[in-house]
Image (cartoon, rainbow, N blue to C red):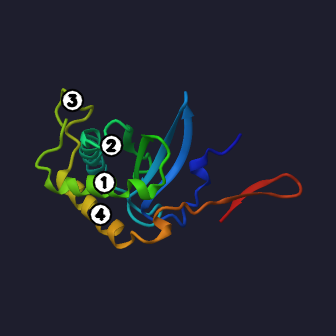
């Protein structure tokens, strides 16, 4: 069985940033999945679940209302490992081209007074939100992205290589 592409990323070396996870063709349209990594896997504690839920609502709302980008947004949602989010956009742009969009989206969290859609009618678990912690994570991520804007490691995945021995055994090495 083939290992899916996101498992070929060296998670011992990845840093927070914006990466292309995969590019698919749907019909005649390219669709790109971006890995928006907020925390360093297996090093930093994961994002608090309630804060992650609030960030999902806040940033999804921002992205789907941004006049320049709203028609391009297909999906925004959390990673199962709670270290970041996936953003799926129409087209195929390098991560540097969506840098400003994501910085502005995370900056917008600071001015939020409530979490949009955090009601029993609009949300599957409306009691699980933490706006204060969402603001903390968002501000920390904005600072990090701003301080590291010129560094390639926030835009390029460290890949794990799949090596095959002479006798056919497969293993990964970074």
Cα separation between marks 4 and 1: 17 Å
Badge 2 density bin: few <14, some 14–19, many ≥20, Cα 10 Å: some
Badge 1 density bin: few <14, some 14–19, many ≥20, Cα 10 Å: some
Camera-near label (4 vs 3) is: 4
| Mark closer to the chain start, 4 or 3 | 3
Which residue is outermost to the right?
167
Q: x, y (%) of residue 40? A: 44, 63
Where is mark 2, residue-wise? 69
| Mark closer to the chain start, 4 or 1 | 1
- State the image quarter where residue 61 is shown: top left
Camera-near label (4 vs 1) is: 4
| Mark closer to the chain start, 1 or 3 | 1
Q: In front here: 157 or 38?
A: 157
Residue located at (35% from left, 66% from top): 145
Where is mark 1, residue-wise? 48
Where is mark 4, residue-wise? 142
Camera-near label (1 vs 3) is: 3
Cα separation between marks 1 and 2: 28 Å
Q: In front here: 109 or 72?
A: 72
Which label belongs to residue 122? 3
Cα separation between marks 4 and 2: 19 Å
Camera-near label (1 vs 2) is: 2
């Amino acid at each position: 069985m083939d290992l899916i592409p996101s498992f070929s990323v060296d998670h011992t070396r990845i840093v927070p940033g914006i990466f292309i996870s995969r590019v698919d063709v749907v019909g005649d349209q390219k669709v790109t999945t971006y890995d928006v990594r907020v925390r360093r896997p297996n090093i930093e504690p994961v994002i608090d679940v309630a804060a992650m839920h609030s960030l999902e609502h806040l940033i999804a709302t921002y992205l789907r209302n941004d006049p320049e980008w709203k028609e391009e947004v297909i999906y925004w949602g959390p990673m199962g490992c709670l270290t970041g989010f996936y953003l799926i956009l129409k087209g195929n742009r390098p991560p540097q081209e969506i840098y400003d969009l994501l910085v502005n989206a995370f900056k917008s969290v600071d001015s939020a007074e409530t979490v949009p859609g955090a009601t029993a009618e609009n949300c599957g678990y409306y009691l699980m939100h933490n706006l204060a912690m969402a603001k903390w994570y968002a501000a920390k991520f904005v600072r990090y992205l701003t301080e590291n804007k010129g560094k390639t490691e926030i835009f390029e995945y460290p890949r794990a290589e799949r090596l095959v021995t002479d006798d056919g055994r497969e293993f990964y090495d970074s």
